Amino acid sequence: MPVRMVKNAVGPSLGRIVAKLDRLPKEGYEYWKKITPKKTGNAKRRTRLQGNKIKADYDYAVPLDEGRSRQAPRGMSKPTVDYLDRRLRRILRK
């Protein structure tokens, strides 16, 4: 009987954690787009989420991500990874 109690207590919690983890790629994508510099809107328009990967489909994606914009001096990759790291820590802490 104690095993069943533990399983019942862990099951729903684990399910909630897995659901939150499944949303992380989309949250990362949304954060990436939020911090993407906007001059003409091309970079935001041409950034897509493909599976669990963010695809920036424009010629100046690498320079922009390397911080060659005053609007995003840290680029987008590093801040997005930092954001996802914080989210992951929050999810696993609960």
Image: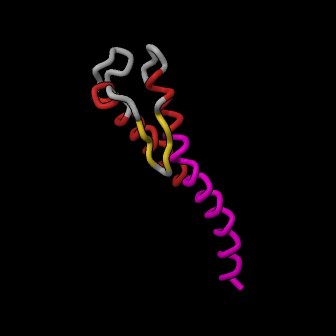
Which region is colored magenta?
Answer: 1-28
> Is residue 53 part of the magenta span, yes or no?
no
Total label count? 0
SS assignment for the magenta stretch, majority: helix
Q: Residue at x 52, y 54 (%)?
A: 92
Q: Name the foreground residue: 60 vs 27.
A: 60
Q: Would residue 72 appear left or right of 87 to someone viewing this image?
A: left
For the N terminus, the image quarter is: bottom right
Residue 17 in view: yes
Residue 9: % across, % down: 68, 69
Q: Would residue 20 appear left or right of 71 to someone viewing this image?
A: right
Q: How is the image coloured?
A: secondary structure
Residue 19: % across, % down: 62, 56
Q: Residue at x 32, y 21 (%)?
A: 73
Q: Is residue 15 above or below residue 68?
A: below
Residue 74 in view: no
Task: Examine the image and state in which quarter residue 6 appears.
Answer: bottom right
Q: Would residue 21 appear left or right of 84 to someone viewing this image?
A: right
Q: Residue at x 28, y 20 (%)?
A: 68
Q: Is residue 59 above or below residue 48?
A: above
Q: Residue at x 55, y 43 (%)?
A: 26
Task: Examine the image and state in which quarter residue 18 appears.
Answer: bottom right
Residue 87: % across, % down: 50, 44
> Is residue 15 part of the magenta span, yes or no?
yes
Residue 61: % across, % down: 34, 30
Kindly give the residue lying farthest to the bottom in the view shown. Answer: 1
